[in-house]
Image (cartoon, grey):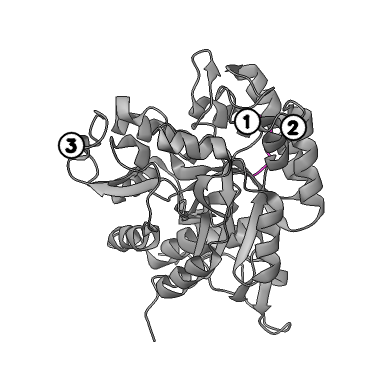
Amino acid sequence: MRRSIARFIVDTHCHITTLYQPGTKEGWEMVERCEWNGLQYELEPFDNCFLTLYDMDRYGVDMAILLPSIAGTLNESQAKLVKRFPDKFRACCSDQKTVLNAMRGGAPWTFKAALKEIEEALKTGYFVGIGEFVPGTRAGSGLIPGCEGPVSFEQRVEEWAALCELGIKYDVPVLCHDQILFMRKGNWTLTDLLAKVSEMNPKAKIVQTHGAVEDERERGMDAIRDMYTVVASLDNVYMETGGWCEKQFEIAFEAGVTANHLMWGHDYGNVPQYIVRGNIEKFGPKLKPLEYRKTLSLMAFGYKNFPAVPTYQPDFYGWGLRTIDRVGDWLTQDEINLILGGTAAKLYKLPVPYSRMFPEGRPDIFGDKWEESIPFIPRDQVQHPDPEDLKMSTKPFIPKVRKP
């Protein structure tokens, strides 16, 4: 029997319905002219589930959250995979048809139409979250008629209020990817947005995808520390740790982030990325080195005279799990169990084999709300629950003071 790194492992950021190849004749013509980068134009859907299932089995990944991606991938494709493999996949939804229809010359994109498509998807019961790209994230790309940028801070906060309202109504998290392909009007950051949205929508659950910091190349460790400090103060904001190195985990915990707000997820799929090390400037753009790490995920089109999309499947699982191994030198196993699966199981309501698999009631993890963490996983999510008559004490211990 192979040893697993955790009791229950969930990939919270998985793309397996495309190989990131052009979905139109015009797209292939752009490939020939070396003008296509795999992230902006319509893609050809592809079922990559069998290689994914193979990798999940090899690395001990129990479940994956499927996210829609660039135009061409549809919510319906994700739902079909959930129906075929209910013990392996759950899915999030976004405004996929609305975007694709606008790109093909149909009705221009509107925020109202995007919200309508998302709610229709949520009503089916096949989706556990909103995102990865929430409506308007593609603003400023110039490719989607009606979806225009830049957008002011006030407008984006108002749009997020509508998204959070949907999330609360259907009890699902909203994924935040506003740091990519999003044009801002004014001097505000993703950290500002997360703080304001969290304050205005305290009942909403917000997931910062990639756990990314938009200005880390300019400000380095200071930018990362500032964002993680803010996130640590927000009870309803969670961060993916996919792509993190061990230094980022160290900063997060120093800033006060706890394991029940972190989730492992790596952008798995044949996305246009390589995991690189060493002198990345030799073939690619002149990027300021990230001195705190030796490897990172780099978009393939950052290289000159190379294909925009890898022809093989980059191994995100091996890379990511080895990072957790290094973090395990100083984190407790209970915290690792939350990061790799427990937090996601709680947030996305995933079925878990048994009760009492994840830490609960610990003030060092749950703070003064430790009582609310018992049980951590609701009984209806447990496939083999404990007997109904099982009794456990949850009363705090108060030591007696001896009289002198």
Position of 197 relative to 353 (above/below):
above
Q: Earlier in the sequence, mark 2 or mark 1?
A: 2
Which of the two labelled residues, at mark 3 and mark 1, occupies the earlier sequence position? 1
Which residue does the image show at 68% across and 41% down from the upper left? Answer: 96
Closest to the observer: 321 or 345? 321
- Which residue carries the number 1 mark? 197
Residue 177, percent from left and from top: 54, 37
In the rendering, at what x and y percent does residue 190 appear? 50, 28
- Residue 319 relative to residue 141: left or right: left
> Which picture quadrant has residue 152?
top right
C-alpha gap between disc 2 and disc 3 = 45 Å
Q: Is residue 382 magenta?
A: no
Q: Report which residue position mark 3 lands on.
A: 282
Q: What residue range appears in magenta?
A: 200-205
Q: Residues within 10 Å of mark 1 (few under 14, many from 20)?
A: many
Above or below — where is 330 with respect to 177?
A: below
Please name which of the two marks, 3 or 1, marks the residue nearer to the observer.
3
Secondary structure under tag 3 reads: helix
User: Is residue 276 placed above or below 221 in the rendered structure?
Assistant: below
In the image, 213: left or right of 369? Answer: left
How crowded pointer 3 is (Cα within 10 Å; few <14, some 14-19, many 20+) is rated as: few
The disc at residue 318 is: none
